[in-house]
Image (cartoon, helix red, strand yellow):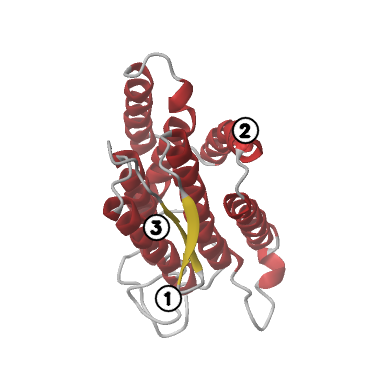
Amino acid sequence: MADGISSFWGPVTSPEWCEKNYVYSSYIAEFYNTISNIPCILLAIIGLVNALRQRFEKRFSVLHLSNMALAIGSMLYHATLQRVQQQGDETPMVWEMLLYIYILYSPDWHYRSTMPTFLFLYGAAFAVVHALVRFGIGFKVHYAILCLLCIPRMYKYYIYTQDMHAKRLAKLYLATLFLGTLCWLFDRLMCENIAGWYLNPQGHAFWHAFMGFNSYFANTFLMFCRAQQLGWNPKVVHFIGLCPYVKIQKPKTQ
């Protein structure tokens, strides 16, 4: 904790990251780890507006809202470093991955109601257990397994997509995931060394920023692929030349 600034939230009850606590405000424990979630929220709003405006399936609106909820939960966790807020960060992480699994695999699911029912019950059960038990490394392993389950399907979508702009989205998704993971590992494994540096590179904050873009690129790529499956003639265009999004042209019968 920084000298002269007290904690509004009381003693820390959750794991801390490699950033000094309460340096700028008594209301924000880890300042950079908190504000670095803002890009994810802004990008989720852009994705949500696009999904609603073009009347994509509700699953994509829920997905963007899930990204937003996850970022807000992460902000609350890093601002307070409290056990309850940590759950508000980690539980949405699992829910979000279950939603990705549903979107990725639902086109090949023969029993339409079985998959969402199972994933919903799994997510609800995890939330209850996670509220009662501290997982620690078990949570990270569980989350990594859910992420790995998504990779084969993402690769299948990539190799079957001919549009170069859509393929670029998939490459940006991988690049931001790789860079974000490096930042996370650097912050976690090198913290003792970083503590002695004059300037903290804020690896965990960069992880948040990269993962905000990562989620947006993944969502946009999946929107493109789903629009192709439905025959909506999708194109990847850019807002003011920078932010990619999917523009569709539905058949008049739809």
Sequence-wise, the earlier of marks 2 and 1 is: 1
- Which amino acid is tagged 2? Lys
Q: Secondary structure at mark 3?
A: helix
Q: Residue at coordinates 46% horizontally, 48% vertically from top-left?
A: 234
Q: Mark 2 and 1 residues: CB-CB less than 8 Å, in contact?
A: no
Which badge, 1 or 3, comes first in the chain's sequence?
1
Calculate the distance from the C-alpha at mark 1 to the C-alpha at mark 3: 20 Å
Residue at 37%, 80% in the rendered image: 25
At label 3, the amino acid type is Ala
Judged left or right of residue 193, residue 200 is: left
Callout 2: SS: helix
On residue 71, which mark appears? 3
Provide the secondary structure element on which disc 1 rests: loop
Front: mark 2 or 3: 2
Picture quarter with the C terminus = top left
Alpha carbons under labels 2 and 1: distance apart: 46 Å
Q: Of the residues shown, which amino acid type is indicated by label 1? A: Tyr
Q: Position of residue 220 (x, y in %)?
A: 47, 51
Residue found at the far front of this picture: 252
Mark 1, residue position: 22
Residue 81 seen from this side: no
Q: Position of residue 10 (x, y in %)?
A: 33, 65
Q: Quadrant of residue 232?
A: top left
Image disc number at residue 192: none
Q: Residues within 10 Å of mark 3 (few under 14, many from 20)?
A: many
Q: Identify the residue under disc 2.
A: 156
Question: What x and y, as percent, mark residue 133?
Answer: 40, 35
80 up-or-down from 230: above or below: below
